[in-house]
Amino acid sequence: MRPFKEAIFYQIWPRSFKDSNQDGIGDLQGIISQLDYLQSLNIDYIWISPFYQSPQDDYGYDVSDYRNIDPSYGTMADFIQLVQEAKQRNIGIICDLVANHTSTQHAWFQEALNNPNSDKRDYYFFRPIKEGLPNNWISIFGGSAWTQVNEEDYALTLFTPTQADLNWDNPKVRQEIKDIMRFWLDLGIAGFRLDVFNTISKIDGLISKYPQKKGFQFADDYILNRPKGQQYLKALLQDLKQDYQFITIGEGMLIDQEAAAIMCGPEKNQLDMIIHFDLHMLGCGPLGKFDFRKGYLYSTKDFKNILHSWNKAAIKHHFHVASTMSNHDQPRAVSRFGDDHTYRFESAKALFAINFFNVGSPFIYQGEEIAMKNMKLPIEEWKDFEAKNTYQALQSMMKVPAFLAKKIIQKMSRDHARGVMQWNQSAHGGFSDVQPWFKVNDDYESINVENQNEDPHSVLSYVRQLTHLYHTIPAFTQGKHTESMLEHPHLIVMHKDDGKQRISCICNFSKKKMKYTLMEDEVVLLSNIDHHSLNQLQPYETLITLNTYS
Ligand code: NOJ
């Protein structure tokens, strides 16, 4: 299988990818049925969001049994078949390891609740109710981070109230996680995406309050990037890497470059690559994606500065970035960063080109390759806990009026990314023969895989051409990365040069025409519009060019 530094990754959120058994929920056999399609995208690895047994309060990120497949997704035999059939196509399967927390339905948690003498009590953070709320930490999804779980106890739940944080200071917990990883590695998987790995260690004693702040606070200083968590991770991976070869992709929640440099990079024995949040936080206020006070406004320059700063940091500190334009937690890329109305094709293709020129490995999120758009969801159809809970929290804790709270959620909701995959124009978008678990986006008759499959101008065809170039021109992955026109307000220009060839991405990331002249020896390899005119770039026009040194 291709080394991760040269690879293209594709993320599947299984519930919405493809339903094979007609129960309205995507499943593993559905993924198997689309392996030829995935291969046609020239991808190397598939990261699948969790499919383990789970009550689905956070759609699988609340695991109740790490060694079993949730019946809605299929069986272990299906999974083994998936790994084998993917391997036959030179595609590796990356599992999602959710090890910061378990579902409160997990046997460990249940035992801890039911037996006061059980060693599982120390797997979690329990605090007595009679002593009052232990601290003022806020959950990532709004409300207190402490949930009353029985008559006596609060448990720390940094995400939904049914996701209880694990106590990584307990060596038994670390051993359990290691055993779980071995279990999946023995089944032949290619690696793990580690869910919020930079919160696994909390400050000793969960100290009470932020000194000068009142009310509930996001406990970033106390839960993110803590050195002990880094040591635990290092020891865990060092040990496993003696027996297995596998890729680790860390989701760094709100991670900064300094922490990324510490946790990622070959000599660090920690992670192979890192997912950061900075691009997704563009135009948001300091409190995160639902902090609307900056109006979600940003310029191309702001967008470019984030790309540039991470590209520069990755080169300087030798870490590898998992470059994403969207995922299951973000709105659709073309709606968030592009123009999903007038320039949907152009801007979606431009985002792909940029993503493939960033330093790191490009990730494609299901549906991005056909430029699926945000959903238009009335409040009754919201599914995601984060959306529903933050809607309430914005009103009760931040005193935001309901109409504004609704607008904010509709702008940034994770539900946008979770609409079912639009395969064709038949009923339910070809995702299933029956009514899917979630609304099919209204536009499925025009936006779907089948429509774009044979159309040479489609986003899908562009993606196939781009991924093909990525794998055939060594400069893409071996070349020295540079950027030019950094001060230009609308043009994003990046280069990769391996001494034999120089490839460039020249992107007019705006709705206006821009002047630009190619060099004499520069040939256009791929364009996202039909007719390139000399000395001028059309709105969102993006050229991938090649100079060959003689
Ligand atoms: C990050 C995952 O991407 C998200 O979907 C999930 O809700 C949280 N971690 C909690 O597991």
Image (tube, rainbow, N blue to C red):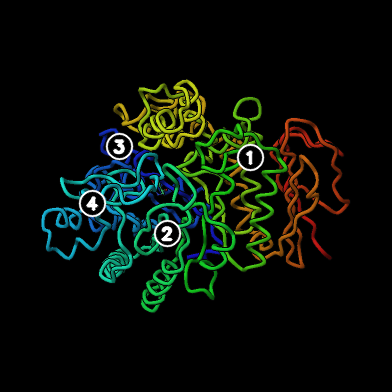
Residue located farthest toward the bottom when viewing the structure as drawn: 242
- Choose top left, top right, bottom left or bottom right for residue 397: top left
* Kind of residue sitting beneath label 1: Lys
User: Which mark is nearer the camera, 2 or 1?
Assistant: 2
For the residue labelled by badge 2, is the local secondary structure a helix, a strand or a loop? helix
Q: Earlier in the sequence, mark 1 or mark 3?
A: 3
Q: Quadrant of the C terminus?
A: bottom right
How packed mark 2 is, by other alpha carbons closer than 10 Å (few <14, some 14-19, many 20 or more), is many
Q: Earlier in the sequence, mark 1 or mark 4?
A: 4
State the residue position of label 2. 197
Residues at circles 1 and 3 in contact by the CB criterion of under 8 Å: no
Alpha carbon separation for disc pair 1 and 4: 39 Å
Asked whether, in this view, residue 525 is left or right of residue 399, the answer is right
User: Which mark is nearer the camera, 3 or 2?
Assistant: 2
Residues at circles 2 and 1 in contact by the CB criterion of under 8 Å: no
For the residue labelled by badge 1, is the local secondary structure a helix, a strand or a loop? helix
* Kind of residue sitting beneath label 3: Ile
- Residue 145 in the image: above or below residue 194: above
Alpha carbon separation for disc pair 4 and 2: 19 Å
| x then y, percent, for residue 39 | 47, 51
State the residue position of label 1. 349
User: Which mark is nearer the camera, 4 or 3?
Assistant: 4
State the residue position of label 4. 64
Q: Earlier in the sequence, mark 3 or mark 2?
A: 3
